[in-house]
Image (tube, rainbow, N blue to C red):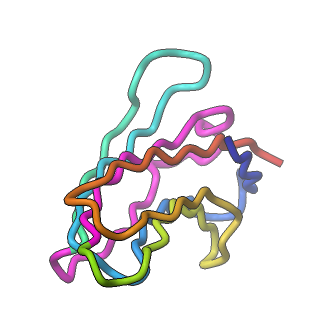
Amino acid sequence: MQTVNFDPAGGPIVVRVECVPNRNGSYKVLLWEAGKNQVVKEYAGNFINADDDAFTLDPPDSAHDGRLVEALVVVAIPSGVGPSDVTLSVLQKGLVLGGDTAIVAPGSPAQMVDLYVKLVKR
């Protein structure tokens, strides 16, 4: 699991899910409470529509110290094309602070990827 250090006074924290090159798929992003089996917030989306796949975490930023961000992504990669990179990124002030990435191979009707990052304040 990757650790992402954020500035508690640095502006909104944004989490983004991407699939490059873009393929049919959907995802859920879960924000887990620090040290607990409790989901604080859940976000959902897909790569089929034009909606943005980025979500701003609720303030205050300091509340996110120690929380886990998990992205459960299901992507279909057809045969005869190359793989896709599925990425969970954490941003602040438009800059990528870190994240987690997996490569999804072609030829699967649907493959699930589970990405995690731990948020830690600087």
Q: Looking at the image, how many numbered discs can be counted on the residues?
A: 0
Most distant residue in the right direction? 122
Viewer-proximal residue, 12 or 47?
A: 47
Left or right: residue 80 compared with residue 88: left
Left or right: residue 69 compared with residue 8: left
64 drawn magenta = yes
Quadrant in which residue 56 is drawn: bottom left
Quadrant in which residue 24 is drawn: bottom left
Which stretch appears magenta? Answer: 48-77
Quadrant that contains the N terminus: top right
58 drawn magenta = yes
Q: Residue at x 56, y 44 (%)?
A: 116
* x, y percent for residue 46: 22, 65
Most distant residue in the left direction? 49
* x, y percent for residue 57: 46, 52
Q: Is residue 76 above or below residue 3?
A: below
Most distant residue in the top direction? 36
* x, y percent for residue 20: 43, 80
Q: Residue at x 26, y 75 (%)?
A: 79
Viewer-proximal residue, 16 or 87?
A: 87
* x, y percent for residue 115: 51, 48
Quadrant in which residue 92 is drawn: bottom right
Q: Is residue 99 above or below residue 62?
A: below
Q: Residue at x 28, y 70 (%)?
A: 77
Q: Residue at x 59, y 25 (%)?
A: 34
Viewer-proximal residue, 23 or 2?
A: 23
Left or right: residue 60 compared with residue 44: right
Left or right: residue 19 compared with residue 65: left
